[in-house]
Image (cartoon, rainbow, N blue to C red):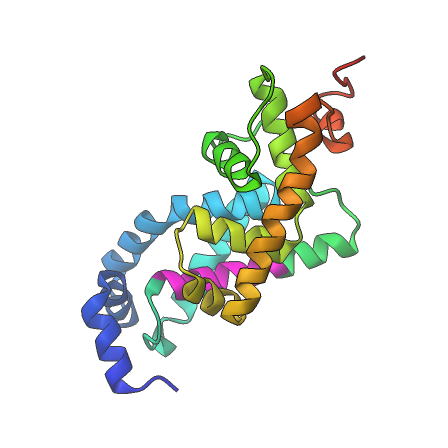
């Protein structure tokens, strides 16, 4: 239960909370403003989280639909972005579980229109690795996508929220409904797993199997 004091504090500190309170009062312009502010950010995180552009676009629409449906019950007990990405995280997790049950392969499309440069830089920086040779941009993009998708759903989401949304450990914990130590552990394991996934390619040019598939079945020695 959100206290009046807590609600007032967030309303005073967060302009997006104030917009959502206007949405609660059926202000359509305020809702449109929130969509404009968060649509691209949600799409970026969700595309990298679920690995498919079309699926991510559907999830973004579902996030805003749920926000609108929940407007009358809205009480500001956290930053608006934390509340919004909690909804997004839950939807992404449910979507991934459904796809897992259908045994679908979760690799991002090579034709994605989202820029890979921020993702590449983040993944390489988090792995602590530096390239020891000249690498092809499209090849590197495929390897980075494969490395990101090799993480568990929770590791991937924690890393994306940390790096793309610049959320604190506390905010990530609130968003993912975890403890702060659990978030720290997820991020630590994600960095180790990224290094393990990227190192063979960064050091010796060895492509992961999933990257070879994405590039049309041609490895560096073929």
Location of residue 18 in the rendering, given as x and y in whole percent from the top left corner? 22, 67
Which residue is nearer to you in this view: 107 or 30? 107
Location of residue 169 in the rendering, given as x and y in whole percent from the top left corner? 44, 62
> In the rendered view of the protein, which quadrant contains the C terminus?
top right
Residue 188 appears in the figure: yes
Q: Which residue corresponds to the image point at 59% horizontal and 47% vertical from the top-left? A: 191
Which residue is farthest left?
Answer: 12
Residue 108 appears in the figure: no
Q: Which residue corresponds to the image point at 65% horizontal and 34% vertical from the top-left? A: 198
> In the rendered view of the protein, which quadrant contains the N terminus?
bottom left
User: In the figure, residue 140 lies in which quadrant?
Assistant: top right
Seen in the image, is 193 located left or right of residue 165? right
User: In the figure, residue 7 lies in which quadrant?
Assistant: bottom left
Seen in the image, is 105 located left or right of residue 171? right
Seen in the image, is 174 located left or right of residue 146? left
Q: In the rendered view, tell whether residue 121 sits above or below residue 4.
A: above
Residue 124 colored in magenta in the image: no
Q: Mainly helix, strand or loop, the magenta region?
A: helix
Which residue is nearer to you in this view: 175 or 197? 197
Which residue is farthest top?
Answer: 222
Q: Which residue corresponds to the image point at 48% horizontal and 64% vertical from the top-left? A: 87
Q: In the rendered view, tell whether residue 144 sits above or below residue 164.
A: above
Q: Which residues are magenta?
A: 81-93
Q: In the rendered view, tell whether residue 135 sits above or below residue 102.
A: above
Seen in the image, is 58 located left or right of residue 23? right
Location of residue 50 in the rendering, given as x and y in whole percent from the top left corner? 60, 47
Location of residue 25 in the rendering, given as x and y in whole percent from the top left corner? 25, 72
Q: Give the number of callouts.
A: 0
Q: Which residue corresponds to the image point at 58% horizontal and 14% vertical from the top-left? A: 134
């Amino acid at each position: 239960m959100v206290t009046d004091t807590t609600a007032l504090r967030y309303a005073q500190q967060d302009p997006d909370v104030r917009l959502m309170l206007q949405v609660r009062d059926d202000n359509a312009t305020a809702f449109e403003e929130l969509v404009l502010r968060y649509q691209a950010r949600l799409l970026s995180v969700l595309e990298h989280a679920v690995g498919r552009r079309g699926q991510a676009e559907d999830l973004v629409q579902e996030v805003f639909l749920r926000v609108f449906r929940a407007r009358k019950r809205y009480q500001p007990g956290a930053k608006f972005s934390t509340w919004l990405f909690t909804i997004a995280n839950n939807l992404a997790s449910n979507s991934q579980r459904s796809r897992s049950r259908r045994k679908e392969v979760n690799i991002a499309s090579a034709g994605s229109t989202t820029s890979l440069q921020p993702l590449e830089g983040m993944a390489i920086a988090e792995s602590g690795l530096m390239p020891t040779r000249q690498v092809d941009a499209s090849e590197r993009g495929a390897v980075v996508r494969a490395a990101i998708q090799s993480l568990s759903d929770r590791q991937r989401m924690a890393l994306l929220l940390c790096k793309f949304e610049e959320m604190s450990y506390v905010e990530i914990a609130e968003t993912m409904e975890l403890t702060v130590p659990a978030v720290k552990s997820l991020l630590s394991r994600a960095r180790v797993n990224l290094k393990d996934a990227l190192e063979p390619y960064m050091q010796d040019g060895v492509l992961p199997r999933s990257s070879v598939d994405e590039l049309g079945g041609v490895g560096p020695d073929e």
